[in-house]
Image (cartoon, rainbow, N blue to C red):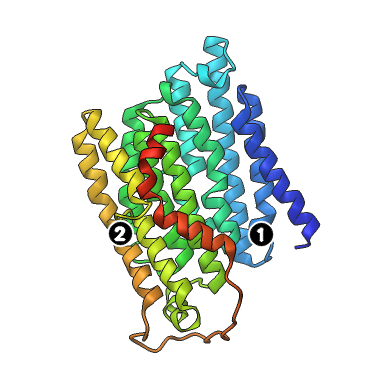
């Protein structure tokens, strides 16, 4: 793909996101989401591989259905209340339809089936966009309507997302699918807290974006698409493999790394809201995803593969250290000590 086309798609994606997050009117928000969807489609299917074309088709169909539901929800609300303002979503049926529409856009359980397949068919850099930037506009819509959303429905979806995201990632060997299920389980943590503390859900999203970007860019730098390739990456780039290990453990939410901060704050907030059972359930379910993060971490730092791998070994290339990866990894590991400052900002 030539640079001019990439620039057009990137700027369109940025424009769509900006329109959605800065709008007060439902039609404008819907327009931004549509621009976003159309801008990312060529980036998914740019390799012209049948799997990439299939991924782009699935993504388009799912996002179009979700956008139609979102438009239907806002029209129903306008019909009953006369309000097109995003923050004035008060009709219960509209709230229910909107929650379903945004759950489809984000890939929350039970609307998660499209996400691993689309991510598997996309290049790693596009996968990074799908896991982070493309989820930002729907999360902001949830943030703006959080006062009127059904907390029981969101809590149920959150617990299911944390459970299925961890459980279905256990048996995967493709790194993109593992990261897709990781994304689903993290969305569960955001969904459970959005109605009680929307700012905390946004903080969780920002830190998740930071850690996921570090993992995707590291894997893209090492050209790792499956676990067997990851097993032989240590000899090629030991420093990068070590930082990947730490970033994966941070993504799993182990203290004293950055990923522990949002989980700790969410459990604290759930306890304050007198939901100790939900806090216990989602904490225990995060152990499932901890298993596959540990497996990835083990594969990335292993020095001698336990069996003969059936793939071509790559040439050793001495590329300069990527500054982006260095900054993102540092932030993904070391933000916990400044949590008091983050809490005062919130």
Quarter in which the N terminus is drawn: bottom right
Q: Which residue is mark 2?
A: 290
Q: Which residue is mark 1?
A: 45
In the image, 211 versus 5, the foreground residue is 211
Q: Earlier in the sequence, mark 1 or mark 2?
A: 1
Q: Are marks 1 and 2 in contact (CB under 8 Å)?
A: no
Against 171, residue 4 (above or below) is above
Could you say whether the residue bearing mark 1 is in a helix, strand or loop?
A: loop
Asked if one can make out residue 236 in the rendered structure from this viewpoint, the answer is yes
How far from the left and from the top, in percent, is residue 37? 64, 44
Quarter in which the C terminus is drawn: top left
In the image, 190 versus 331, the foreground residue is 331
Q: Residue at x 41, y 71 (%)?
A: 242
Tag of residue 165: none
Q: Residue at x 70, y 50 (%)?
A: 10
In the image, 51 versus 1, the foreground residue is 1
How far from the left and from the top, in percent, is residue 257? 35, 55
Give how far apart the Cα atoms at labels 1 and 2 are: 32 Å
Asked if one can make out residue 120 in the rendered structure from this viewpoint, the answer is no
Against 47, residue 150 (above or below) is above
Q: Residue at x 53, y 43 (%)?
A: 135
Against 44, residue 62 (above or below) is above
How far from the left and from the top, in percent, is residue 343? 38, 35
């Amino acid at each position: 793909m030539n640079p001019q086309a990439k620039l057009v798609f990137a700027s369109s994606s940025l424009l769509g996101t900006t329109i959605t997050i800065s709008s007060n009117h439902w039609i404008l928000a819907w327009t931004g989401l549509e621009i976003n969807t159309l801008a990312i489609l060529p980036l998914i299917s740019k390799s012209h591989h049948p799997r990439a074309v299939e991924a782009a088709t699935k993504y388009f169909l799912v996002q179009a259905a979700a956008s139609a539901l979102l438009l239907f929800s806002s029209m129903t609300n306008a019909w009953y209340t006369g309000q097109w303002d995003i923050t004035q979503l008060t009709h219960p049926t509209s709230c229910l339809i909107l929650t379903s529409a945004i759950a489809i856009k984000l890939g929350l359980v039970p609307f998660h089936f499209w996400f691993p397949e689309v991510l598997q068919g996309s290049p790693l850099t596009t996968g990074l966009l799908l896991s982070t930037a493309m989820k930002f506009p729907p999360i902001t819509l949830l943030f703006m309507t959080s006062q009127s959303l059904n907390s029981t429905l969101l809590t149920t979806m959150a617990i299911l997302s944390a459970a299925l995201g961890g459980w279905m990632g256990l048996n995967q060997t493709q790194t993109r699918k593992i990261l897709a299920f990781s994304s689903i389980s993290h969305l569960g943590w955001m969904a459970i807290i959005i109605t009680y503390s929307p700012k905390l859900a946004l903080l969780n999203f920002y830190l998740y974006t930071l850690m996921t970007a570090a993992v995707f860019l590291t894997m893209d730098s090492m050209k790792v698409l499956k676990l067997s390739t990851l097993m032989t990456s240590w000899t090629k780039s030991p420093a990068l493999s070590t930082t990947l290990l730490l970033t994966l453990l941070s993504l799993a939410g182990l203290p004293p790394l950055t990923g522990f901060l949002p989980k700790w704050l969410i459990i604290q907030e759930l306890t304050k809201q007198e939901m100790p059972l939900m806090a216990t359930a989602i904490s225990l379910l995060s152990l499932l995803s901890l298993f596959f993060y540990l497996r990835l971490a083990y594969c990335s730092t292993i020095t001698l593969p336990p069996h003969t791998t059936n793939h071509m070994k790559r040439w050793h290339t001495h590329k300069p250290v990527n500054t982006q990866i260095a900054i993102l990894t540092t932030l993904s590991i070391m933000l916990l000590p400044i949590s008091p400052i983050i809490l005062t900002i919130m």
